[in-house]
Image: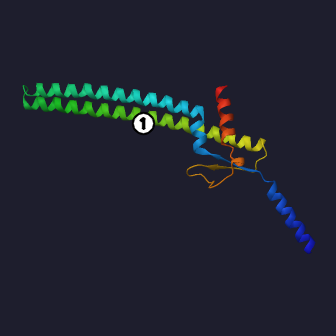
Amino acid sequence: MKKLFLAGLVLGLMSCQQQKMGFVDNIELMDKYQEKIDVEAKFKVKAEALTKKRDSISQAFQLEAQAFQAKAQTMNQQKAQEEYGLIQQKGQFIGQQLQREDQLLQSQGQIEMDTIVSKVKKVIKDYGKSNGYSYILGGGDGGSVLYGTEANDLTDEIVKLLNEAYKK
């Protein structure tokens, strides 16, 4: 019975030793992944263009409102109130339209980033399977690896694979 227990213990220890583990620093990986960098740059350009459009439309609307104020002084009160109501409606419409464009841009950006994250997860999974890893853990801020030796850090290898695949 004692021999059977020792044999089981040895087999258990050997099976534990055979499990291959590694980790990836999620923050570093995403910071070095060229597709993610390119997507961020693309959306930064789009956001800047939207900001310029918003500023231009706001400036034009302010000029229109100022012109109305000057014109309203020569109008009777009822007519001035009617036109003021129309200008308010126009301002609300413009604000809503710009808000919709901003939300659409944010939504598109989130969809692209979610696609990138899914792609990264798949590459890590495939890498783990093809290289005999039992586990590949995520590290970095908010990750589950509090410490890992450099020998178990797969970040650079995964970044290299992702960037090579992206170049193709």
- Specify the amino acid type for callout 1: Gln
**Residue 142 vertical position relative to residue 66 in the rendered view, above or below:** below
Q: Percent position (x, y) of residue 83?
A: 17, 29
Q: Is residue 52 visible?
A: yes
In x, y percent, where is residue 136?
A: 70, 48
Q: Residue at x 65, y 26 (%)?
A: 167
Q: How is the image coloured?
A: rainbow
User: From the viewer's perspective, is 150 left or right of 37?
Assistant: right
Q: Which class describes the residues within 10 Å of circle 1: few (<14), some (14-19), or many (20+)? A: few
Q: Residue at x 71, y 43 (%)?
A: 125
Between residue 119 and residue 140, name the one nearer to us.
140
Q: Residue furthest front?
A: 150
- Whole-percent x, y for residue 26 in the image: 60, 45
In-image side of 142 versus 62 (left or right): right
Task: Say which residue appears at 15% left-offset and 31% top-offset.
Answer: 82
Q: Is residue 25 above or below residue 159?
A: below
Question: The C terminus lies in which quarter of the figure?
Answer: top right
Vertical order, 49 against 23 (above or below): above
User: Disc 1 marks which residue?
Assistant: 103
Q: Nearer the viewer, residue 6 or 43?
A: 6
* Tally of numbered tags: 1
Q: Residue furthest bottom?
A: 1
Q: Confirm whether residue 115 shows in the render.
A: no
Q: Quadrant of the N terminus?
A: bottom right
Q: Is residue 162 above or below residue 74?
A: below
- Is residue 60 shown left or right of residue 119? left
Question: Which element type, helix, strand or loop, lies under badge 1?
Answer: helix
Q: Residue at x 85, y 67 (%)?
A: 9
In the image, residue 149 lies at what x, y percent? 69, 51
Rendered image quadrant of residue 16: bottom right
- Horizontally, residue 139 falls left or right of residue 87, namely right
